[in-house]
Amino acid sequence: MQSFVESYFSNYIEGTKFVIEEALKIVNSRSPQEFREDDSHDVIGTFDAIEASKAIPTMPDTTEGFEALLPTVFREDYILALKALSNEGHAEPYVRMLTTAAKFSALLDYATPDRVFVQLDKSNAKKEPDVAKLNLGALP
């Protein structure tokens, strides 16, 4: 389930927007949604790539378990932190953003789709940045 959530937010940030339940159906059925075949293949391909990358360890042992999902609601924080880093050489906003994203990722319970979807709703993760802020306090 974790690979699906990662692929969902990765695609969403890149502009491939589906309702999360629709995206899960596409990944599970391996069938593209009618009239959105290209977007559906993006979702499936990203999911497959994340699954494959998890099978091949690429991080040192000291970072074992590190994950940093970038939920939809956190998109502006991500972009602003990248701009501060690339335009001004300020790493602090980027480090803060990744730290928050890692905390968010660690708090999610990926045991079942229902559990993680409820947590994504409670934390505002699927909302647009102009509507809500990430709410880590809503997670256990």
Image: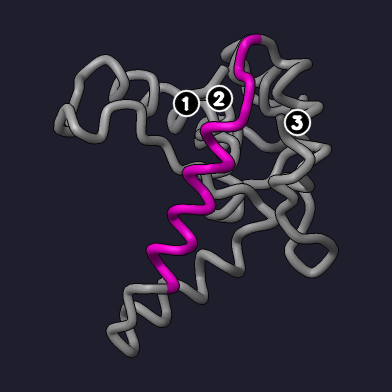
Q: Secondary structure at mark 1?
A: helix
- Under mark 1, the amino acid is Phe
Magenta stretch: helix, strand or loop mostly: helix
Residue at the (75%, 31%) spot, across then down? 119
| Residue 126 on the magenta span | no
Residue at the (44%, 32%) spot, across then down? 46
In-front residue for pair 102/79? 102
Q: Secondary structure at mark 3?
A: helix
Mark 1 or mark 3: name the one nearer the start of the chain: 1
The answer to which quarter of the image holds residue 45 is top left
Locate the N terminus and report the quarter of the image it occupies.
Answer: top right
Can you tell which of label 2 and label 1 is closer to the viewer? 2
Percent across and percent down for residue 104 are: 58, 42
Can you tell which of label 1 and label 3 is closer to the viewer? 3
Counting every numbered tag in the picture gives: 3
Q: Secondary structure at mark 2?
A: helix
Mark 2 or mark 1: name the one nearer the start of the chain: 2
Estimate the spatial distance between the alpha carbons at disc 3 and disc 2, rounded to whole Å. Answer: 15 Å
Mark 3 or mark 2: name the one nearer the start of the chain: 2
Residue bearing mark 3: 119
- Is the residue 44 above or below the residue 138 in the image? above
Q: Residues within 10 Å of mark 2 (few under 14, many from 20)?
A: many
Estimate the spatial distance between the alpha carbons at disc 2 and disc 1, rounded to whole Å. Answer: 6 Å
Q: Are marks 2 and 1 in contact (CB under 8 Å)?
A: yes
- Which label is found at residue 4? 2
Percent across and percent down for residue 140 are: 71, 29
- Which label is found at residue 47? 1
Q: Are marks 1 and 3 in contact (CB under 8 Å)?
A: no
